[in-house]
Image (cartoon, helix red, strand yellow):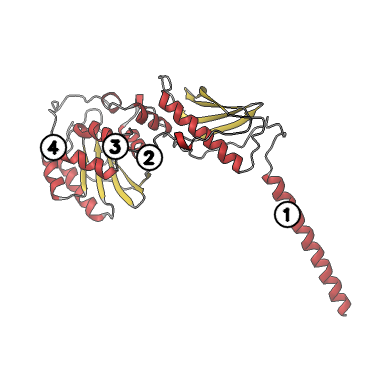
Amino acid sequence: MIYVYLGIAAVVVIALVGFRMNASKRSGAAGQVTGDESGASSGPRSAEPSFAGATVSSFHVDGETASTVFDVPLGDAQAGAYLVELLSFAAVEHLRKKAGQGFPLDGVHRIKISAMRAGEAEVVGTVELPAPGKLPDTKAHMPPRGPVVGLLAALNEVVADTSVSSQPSTGGSLVPVAKFVQLSGPFEARLRGAGVDPSGMSLIDLTLGLFRSGGYAVEATGKNMATAPDASIYSASKAGEKVTLVVFAHGEGDYPEVDERVFGELAVLAGQSNAQRTILMSDKFGPYTMYERERRDKRLVFVTRERLQAFVDSFGIG
């Protein structure tokens, strides 16, 4: 009887060994890079954010050229020098990461960088490698990654300015955000990297692009305000900082000034939140009374129309 048991055990051991060998072969095949050894192959598509915050929408190698396409809108303008520099750096780092994952770079002489215009990829620059398969050392020439000043410093600077611009009549229309907010070249490049075309950006585009370019993770909360049902509420966090963002855009035919009741509800929202600051972003004008509310409650900051440009400038990139 013992021989029968030994025979069954031997069969089980052989089956387990065979199963593991087959699994190992399948795992090895899954980890191989498709294409021939010359590198003239199509790499896997990527949808992850790069250093620049831009998404790499496609990547492939054709002969001596590696092509990296970023999901960055060019709009109607030429790609600025800073944007090209930013995407060039991001493309090199993308290849460096892929090389670390085992992607062969032998025979690659250059990287072609493209962004999107009217739904089509357009080449904006090329990086020549120092030697075939050798990536340049970009760490010493890294473009500025984020704001020169911190968010709290930018907010303090805005709050310190208590000037109120002259406001239009009730029936006056307001110039869109894309027309009156001026952007520096570096910040415009960051916005494009975040997927925003500054020539047609909305207040939400500007706000989310601003915070994301500064390294904040921004998420919609799904909450609503009774006094401003059209407002969108977000949570933004970064390295221990947490803020609540309320984006309240001016709509066609709306009164050009934020209603006082909105500030009251924002004070309640701040009291119920564990965020360090609750920030209103609006392209409507602010009433004089908002300054008194800010003095009473340091958690509140109101970036209304007359403060938008100053906030963008102080939160900008040097």
Residue occupied by mark 4: 162
Q: Earlier in the sequence, mark 2 or mark 4?
A: 4
In this rendered view, identify the residue nearer to me: 267 or 108. 108
Residue occupied by mark 2: 212
- Of tags 1 and 4, which is closer to the observer? 4
Image quarter of the C terminus? top left
For label 1, the crowd category at 10 Å Cα-Cα, with few meaning under 14, some 14 to 19 and many 20 or more, is: few
- Position of 189 relative to 232 (above/below): above
Q: Say which amino acid is labelled 3.
A: Phe
The residue drawn where x is 56% and y is 38% is 96
Q: CA distance from mark 1 to mark 3?
A: 53 Å
Q: Say which amino acid is labelled 2.
A: Arg
Q: Secondary structure at mark 4?
A: loop
Q: Say which amino acid is labelled 4.
A: Thr
Residue occupied by mark 3: 315
Left-right relation of 187 to 65: left
Q: Secondary structure at mark 2?
A: helix
Residue 263: which disc?
A: none
For label 3, the crowd category at 10 Å Cα-Cα, with few meaning under 14, some 14 to 19 and many 20 or more, is: many
Q: Earlier in the sequence, mark 3 or mark 4?
A: 4
* Residue 261 image offset from top left, x and y in percent: 16, 44
- Position of 9 relative to 16 (above/below): below
Residue occupied by mark 1: 23
